[in-house]
Image: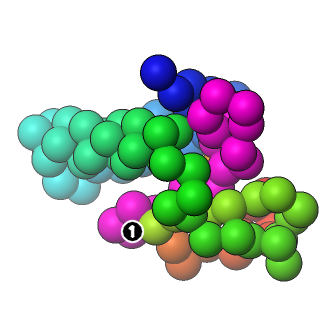
Amino acid sequence: MADCKLSRLATDDIAGIYEYGIRNFGLKQAQLYLREMEMSLEVLAQRPDFGIDSFFLSIRLFRFRQKAYVIFYKKEENGIGVVRILGSKMDFIRHL
């Protein structure tokens, strides 16, 4: 089974996304969105090559678009290490 390790910042990002979803779309929609995010993370852990190389931001950094967010991660021996999960309109360079 592949591992998906979340950085402290990625954990904070997910909590923020969930809270934003509750405030703006309601609990049910926020829970659905969180499940979809978790499924994307599981798929990436099993198939890290699905992401796009983001060498212009950092060496060995990959990104994967998940609806309105971008998952930034690094490949690891048995899965991935998630660095951040940022809104697609955010300044990635500033937040990574």
Which secondary structure class fits the magenta region best? Answer: strand
Rate crowding at label 1 as few (under 14), some (14 to 19) or many (20 or more) other CA atoms within 10 Å. Answer: few
Q: Position of residue 39 (x, y in %)?
A: 32, 41
Q: Position of residue 11 (x, y in %)?
A: 57, 32
> Residue furthest toward the left?
28
Name the colouring of the figure: rainbow
Residue drawn at x 55%, y 43% as measured from the top left? 13
With respect to residue 84, does 46 lie above or below? Answer: above
Q: How many marks?
A: 1
With respect to residue 64, does 38 lie above or below? Answer: above
Horizontal side of residue 94 vs 49, given as left or right: right
**Among the 4 quarters of the image, the one containing residue 56:** bottom right
Q: Position of residue 26 (x, y in %)?
A: 14, 45
- Give whichever of 94, 26 is nearer the camera: 94
- Give whichever of 24, 68 is nearer the camera: 68
Residue drawn at x 64%, y 56% as measured from the top left? 72
Amino acid carrying mark 1 in the image = Ala
Screen quadrant of the C terminus: bottom right
In this view of the protein, can residue 85 be seen by the observer? no
Magenta stretch encompasses residue 79: yes
Of helix, strand and loop, which one carries label 1? loop
Residue stretch in magenta: 66-83
Horizontal side of residue 34 vs 96, given as left or right: left
> Residue furthest toward the top?
1
Magenta stretch encompasses residue 80: yes
The residue indicated by pointer 1 is: 68
Q: Position of residue 27 (x, y in %)?
A: 16, 37
Residue drawn at x 27%, y 46% as measured from the top left? 36
In this view of the protein, can residue 82 be seen by the observer? yes
Residue drawn at x 34%, y 67% as measured from the top left? 67
- Give whichever of 65, 77 is nearer the camera: 77
With respect to residue 44, does 59 lie above or below? Answer: below
